[in-house]
Image (cartoon, rainbow, N blue to C red):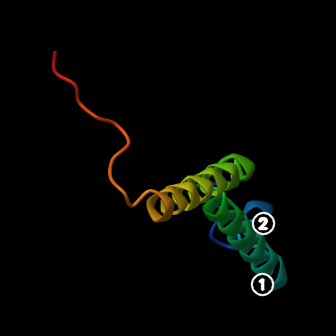
Amino acid sequence: MGACFSCCGNSAEETNLMPSPEERRNQQLEAAERRRQENESRGVKNLDKVRRQQQRALDMERREEEAARQGDNGPTLRWQAS
């Protein structure tokens, strides 16, 4: 019986399909914020670990440069044949 009168007026279901423009705007802002947060943490899960690795790499590079400056007199390892 409800199928005969569905085209004559707005049912409760039809009015709830579209949220108000302000509500829609808020939903879009929330979705954009979620996407931004997901993109920020996408590749790196542990920022402290990455920072430590970068610091270690810098320390190793400094040590190698210092060793190169001090040890320009040749290689320290020598081959010996017996």
Foreground residue among 70 and 64: 70
Element type where label 1 sits in the image? helix
Label disc, if present, on residue 16 of the rendered structure: 2
Between the residue at mark 1 and the residue at mark 2, the CA separation in whole angstroms equals: 13 Å
Horizontal and vertical percent for residue 22?
A: 83, 83
Percent position of residue 50, x then y: 64, 51
Figure quadrant of residue 62: bottom right
Left or right: residue 22 compared with residue 44: right
Q: Which numbered dot is residue 5? A: none
**Residue 10 pos. (x, y %):** 74, 72
Task: Residue type at mark 1: give it.
Answer: Pro
Question: Which corner quadrant holds the C terminus?
Answer: top left
Q: Earlier in the sequence, mark 1 or mark 2?
A: 2
Q: Is residue 82 above or below residue 61?
A: above
Q: Amino acid at mark 2?
A: Asn
Look at 54% across and 61% down and name the residue there: 66
Circle 2 — which element?
loop
Instruction: Determine whether 48 is above or below 66 in the image.
Output: above
Give me the residue at 38% from left, 42% from top.
76
Q: Which residue extends farthest bottom?
A: 21
Q: Quadrant of residue 41?
A: bottom right
Pick the front one: 77 or 10: 77
Which one is closest to the eye, mark 1 or mark 2? 1
Regarding residue 30, the answer to whether it shows in the image is yes
- Tell me residue 31's x, y (percent): 71, 67
Q: Which mark is residue 21?
A: 1
Q: Is residue 9 visible?
A: no
Q: For mark 2, does the 10 Å Cα neighbourhood hold few (<14), some (14 to 19), or many (20 or more) residues?
A: few
The residue that appears at 23% across and 30% down in the rendered structure is 79
On screen, residue 79 versus residue 30, left or right, reads: left
